[in-house]
Image (spheres, rainbow, N blue to C red):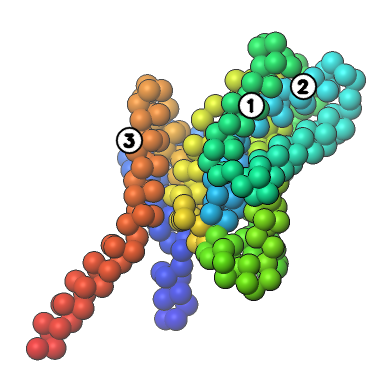
Amino acid sequence: MDIFGKFFRSVVVGPLAALVIVVLLISLTTDRFLTTDNLINVSLQVSTVAIAAIGSTLVILTGGIDLSPGSAVALVSCVLAILVQKKGFSLPAGIIASLILGAGLGMFNGLLSTYGRIPSFVVTLATLGIFRGLAFLITEGHPIFSVSPYLEGIFYGDLFGIPLPFIYLLVFYIISAIFLRNTRRGRAIYAVGGNETAAHLSGIHVNRTRLLAFVIAGFTAAIAGVLLSARLNSGSPNYGVGLELAAIAAAVIGGTSLTGGYGNIIGTLFGALTVAVVQNGLNLNAVPAAWQNITLGFIILFAVGLDMWRGDLGRGFSRIFSFDRGKEES
């Protein structure tokens, strides 16, 4: 019984329940949703958002916000395409350079928002425009197609019938969960977001911890950029539009508090799956793109509302149940 009690008190129960409800509702609207081909398609769709959401979750856990992943994805995809197609880099060398670039973009955000003491919202709102502007600048506004004949295999390959992007996703989430739960730096991320002053007094380097979160966010955005390039075998300054909102939505739906210090990376995975399932269901039901954007916006609003009202709702339910118990005892 104690095992069941711990499960139902777990932070991932809410996101998991939301995912199950969404799956059930969409499966009732179309018989195409639960087909093998469509489920494989969902696993491919969710990979870029879910991997970018890892970094977004870490930044949010420290009490910050990152609005730049979508633009970082675009810039990384363009740099990868230029390096491999036009500069003669081998594909592995181009990918490594692109991942280093992504970590550097995250470090730029982190340095400005920590040591520069500019709010992360302002910094990443600015770099959202800067990174995408650079992508347009280096490509002159044009996509670069046919990057490499081997690039698509990174995305469309499979292992024992499981799409490679979904395997990447699981590996990165396992690593992230171990990092946050079992390492000193991972626990420091929670501590900084929960109470910055207490974290500082306990010997944690607050600025370094926040900088690390931003570097990881840039790195995961770069991975998403490489996967998106592999999916389309191209680089484009238009890639990743709206990705930052989907990544933040995945984190918040997954139970990560926007005030920092509270959340679970596995919950983010369930949140990303929920976003992907909703988008897939809307596509299957031929819902126009405008209504899809509206739906995603309401989902984010609802999730953030639950986060902000969690304490009030908990106190309200406690009063109701304590009132009922009082009546029974009397």
**Residue at which label 3 appears:** 29
| Lower sequence index among marks 2 and 3 | 3
Task: Measuring from the top left, give residue 292's x and y in whole percent.
Answer: 39, 29
Residue 164 can be seen, yes or no: no
Is 95 in front, or is 75? 75
> Marks 1 and 2: which is nearer the front?
1
Is disc 3 placed on a helix, strand or loop?
A: helix
Q: CA distance from mark 1 to mark 2?
A: 19 Å
Is 301 in front, or is 296? 301
Q: CA distance from mark 2 to mark 3?
A: 40 Å
> Marks 1 and 3: which is nearer the front?
1
Q: What amino acid is at disc 2?
A: Ala
**Residue at which label 1 appears:** 130
Residue at image coords 62%, 32%: 127
> Marks 2 and 3: which is nearer the front?
2
Q: In the rendered structure, are the residues bearing label 2 and label 3 in contact, judged by CB atoms less than 8 Å apart?
A: no
Location of the N terminus by quadrant is: bottom left
Taking the image as shown, residue 120 lies to the left or right of residue 93, namely: left
Taking the image as shown, residue 304 lies to the left or right of residue 248, namely: left
Task: Please tell me the numbered disc located at residue 81.
Answer: 2
Q: In the rendered structure, are the residues bearing label 1 and label 2 in contact, judged by CB atoms less than 8 Å apart?
A: no
Is 318 in front, or is 232? 318
Residue at image coords 83%, 37%: 96
Residue at image coords 70%, 11%: 140
Location of the C terminus by quadrant is: bottom left
Task: Measuring from the top left, give residue 31's x and y in whole percent.
Answer: 38, 35
Is disc 1 placed on a helix, strand or loop?
A: helix
Residue 65 can be seen, yes or no: yes
